[in-house]
Image: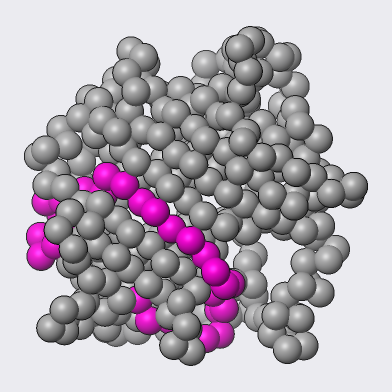
């Protein structure tokens, strides 16, 4: 067992390369931790630093510079905010969280591509309403990412909710009319991945383990696929889940959005907007549908004909972002 890290004093910088404790970012594996311990800023808010020198290869499996990765930044921003709320704002660690919305923009992709070190993430809470048991009724926050040279490179705003873990199963069974949901541990290995899995290069990946789409098909106005992630991929499923987590759905949206450009490895996602009206159930077939509109690709993940996730991705030629 990894010993708990020493607490970081308010205002004191974390040691170079230090990573926040896993329980503060709800991660089981050390290589999935992407940020340093947070510190309180004198003028308000909290500051973290990305820690990407020894992270999962998943975050390197794309063309282009490592930090020019919207999924890495979404996850790093999530971890920066949750760790600050746990460490300083009284948020209980015994919480099951779920996203309401995510809005991330790479305001200066060229600065990200050229960054020669880790990014600083500054977090400000717009709403942090906790119930008496320490669980969040609503957490909404904004963040700004800057390069080591102080250049603004990205900004984000996100909203999450949560319930105590001992009430979570009750909530999920209620949503499923009394039927308990299966888990990734139960389903892992139960069926082989489809032979119609998308070729990695067609979705801007190099490893099949990181491909989450199958049955790619092009219609008159849309591109469609079936959600088919590898449940054994520890970056997509860091611990046991009873639903498809938000990051898997965003990965599916990103892959289909890049595929819709017709030249996925020559494009990069420079903005993500996502809402999550329903849990995405593991035991329901999931269709992913994309439609392009100029610089944006709109994507929905559908189960039983209803959207469980709505997303929009701004795409740009990779050369313009470097």
Determine the image quadrant of residue 165.
bottom right
Q: Judge left or right: residue 274 versus residue 315.
A: right
| Residue 259 x, y percent position in the rendering | 19, 65
Range drawn in magenta: 261-288
Q: Nearer the viewer, residue 316 or 69?
A: 316
Relative to 31, does residue 290 appear above or below in the rendering?
A: below
* Image quarter (top left, top right, bottom left or bottom right) of the C terminus: top left
Q: Nearer the viewer, residue 203 or 260?
A: 260
For the point 47% across and 83% down, the residue is: 306
| Residue 279 x, y percent position in the rendering | 58, 72
Q: Is residue 269 magenta?
A: yes
In this rendering, does residue 19 appear at all?
Answer: no
Q: Is residue 209 magenta?
A: no
For the point 53% across and 46% down, the residue is: 158
In this rendering, does residue 265 appear at all?
Answer: yes
For the point 52% across and 25% down, the residue is: 122
| Residue 59 x, y percent position in the rendering | 37, 46
For the point 28% across and 23% down, the residue is: 115
């Amino acid at each position: 067992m990894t010993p708990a890290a020493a607490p970081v004093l308010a205002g004191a910088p974390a040691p170079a390369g230090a990573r926040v404790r896993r329980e503060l970012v709800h991660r089981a594996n050390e290589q999935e931790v992407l940020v340093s311990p947070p510190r309180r800023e004198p003028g308000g808010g909290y500051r973290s630093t990305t820690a990407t020198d020894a992270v999962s290869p998943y975050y390197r499996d794309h063309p282009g510079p490592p930090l020019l990765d919207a999924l890495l930044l979404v996850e790093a921003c999530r971890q920066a905010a949750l760790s600050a709320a746990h460490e300083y704002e009284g948020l209980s660690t015994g919480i099951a969280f779920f996203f309401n919305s995510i809005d991330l923009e790479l305001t200066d992709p060229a600065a990200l591509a050229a960054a020669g070190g880790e990014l600083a993430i500054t977090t400000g809470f717009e709403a942090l309403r906790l119930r008496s048991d320490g669980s969040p009724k609503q957490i909404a926050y904004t963040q700004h990412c800057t390069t080591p040279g102080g250049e603004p490179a990205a900004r984000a705003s996100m909203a999450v909710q949560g319930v105590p873990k001992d009430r979570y199963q009750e909530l999920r069974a209620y949503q499923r009319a009394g039927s308990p949901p299966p888990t990734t541990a139960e389903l892992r290995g139960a069926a082989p991945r489809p032979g119609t899995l998308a070729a990695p290069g067609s979705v801007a990946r190099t490893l099949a383990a990181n491909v989450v789409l199958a049955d790619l098909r092009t219609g008159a106005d849309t591109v469609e696929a079936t959600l088919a992630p590898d449940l054994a991929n520890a970056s997509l499923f860091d611990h046991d889940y009873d639903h498809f987590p938000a990051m898997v759905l965003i990965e599916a949206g990103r892959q289909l959005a890049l595929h819709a450009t017709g030249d996925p490895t020559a494009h990069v996602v420079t903005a993500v907007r996502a809402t999550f009206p329903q849990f995405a159930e593991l035991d329901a077939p999931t269709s992913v549908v994309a439609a392009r509109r100029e610089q944006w690709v709109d994507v929905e993940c559908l189960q039983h004909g209803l959207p469980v996730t709505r997303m929009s991705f701004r795409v740009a030629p990779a050369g313009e972002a470097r």
